[in-house]
Image (cartoon, rainbow, N blue to C red):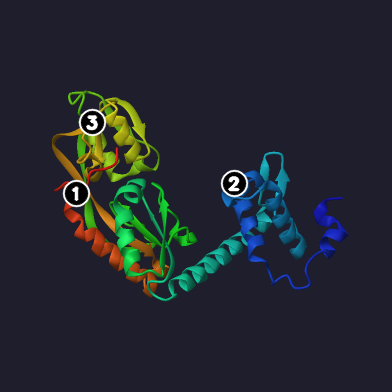
Amino acid sequence: MKKRDHPQFVQAASPNPHRDNWDDLRFVLAVADTGSVSAAARALGVNHATVLRRVAAFEERHGLPVFDRTPVGYSVPRERARLIEAAHEAEAAHLAVARIAAGARAPLSGAVRVTSTDSFCQVVLPPILARLRAEAPDLRIDLLCSNAHADLGRIEAEIAVRPAGALPDDLVGEAVAELGFAVYAPASAPETPFWLGLSGALARSRAAEHMRTAARGEALAGAADSFLVLREMAAAGQGRAMLPCVLGESDARLVRIGTETATVPIWVASHADLADAPRLAAVRRRLGRALAAEAAWLCGDQVKRTLPM
């Protein structure tokens, strides 16, 4: 007898199945989206047994199995597709409530999560955030470093500071300055014919397009998914690379090659659901003003700081 036909399985359903535990539904969606318990566990940061237990709790409460278990993973049978679709709708509503509630807290107090690239997190934002904290001691800033775009819809962060050609449709913000790029070569070998490129999330960036144009089809000697790493590779003599001027201009190990430059807008943005939240709007305004005040340095018109070697 299959588990779905077993009377004990059916009788285990909750007398009130509408009173769902949201966490159980979250685990069901993770398995549906990834196709396996192991992948869902990795995505949620829990162990394999926890995912199995939460999925079983959901199925027993509702008196029906959600998945077909196969040797190659978990699949959603056709008759359960609408259930998963409705679960995604419930997830979206749950996250929208959390975003709006988070944004409604008092201005300039509580925790705000800001995501940006590794270059900005290490070189540009720390002194700006230190000044902001001095003005608002009840404010806590969590800085999340990633060169991939964080999912602000899932509240991985509430404010994004990003160099990008344009904002995704679900974000609202403004371009407050421009990030300048130029070609740099190792000072020890400025005539090197070799080029370095970008990989990972940065391979799709506007900077990567400019670099491919500047390299004029030359074969790459190497690549990195981080401008900080790319700077170190260039400084070590591996080749020339297009770098943000804030990284290249003050590094004595590098020299700028030629006059070819490029710029990318710097955006300060939030998810559309949070755009009017007073607390986040206040933080975005202050971040925007601080970055605008650094415009000459950010676009490469002047050297502002000596970067750590």
At label 1, counting other C-alpha atoms closer than 10 Å, the crowd grade (few under 14, some 14-19, many 20 or more) is some
Comparing marks 2 and 1, which lies closer to the viewer? 1
Say the numbered circle drawn on residue 215. 3
Figure quadrant of residue 65: bottom right
Q: Amino acid at mark 3?
A: Ala
Q: Residue at x 27, y 25 (%)?
A: 237
User: How far from the left and from the top, in percent, is residue 182?
Assistant: 19, 40
Q: Residue at x 74, y 64 (%)?
A: 62
At label 3, counting other C-alpha atoms closer than 10 Å, the crowd grade (few under 14, some 14-19, many 20 or more) is some
Q: Quadrant of the C terminus?
A: top left
- Whole-number angstrom distance, CA of label 2 to CA of label 1: 42 Å
Q: Amino acid at mark 1?
A: Lys
- Residues at marks 2 and 3 touching, judged by CB atoms closer than 8 Å: no
Front position in the image: 90 or 262: 262
Front position in the image: 221 or 55: 221
Q: Earlier in the sequence, mark 1 or mark 3?
A: 3
* Residue 231 visible in the displayed image: yes
Front position in the image: 306 or 55: 306
Say the numbered circle drawn on residue 304. 1
Q: Earlier in the sequence, mark 2 or mark 1?
A: 2
User: How far from the left and from the top, in percent, is residue 186?
Assistant: 23, 29
Q: Amino acid at mark 2?
A: Arg
Figure quadrant of residue 294: bottom left
Question: Which element type, helix, strand or loop, lies under badge 3?
Answer: helix
* Residue where numbered disc 2 is placed: 42
User: How far from the left and from the top, in percent, is residue 258?
Assistant: 13, 34
- Residues at marks 1 and 3 touching, judged by CB atoms closer than 8 Å: no
Q: Is residue 236 above or below residue 145?
A: above
Q: Is residue 229 above or below residue 147?
A: above
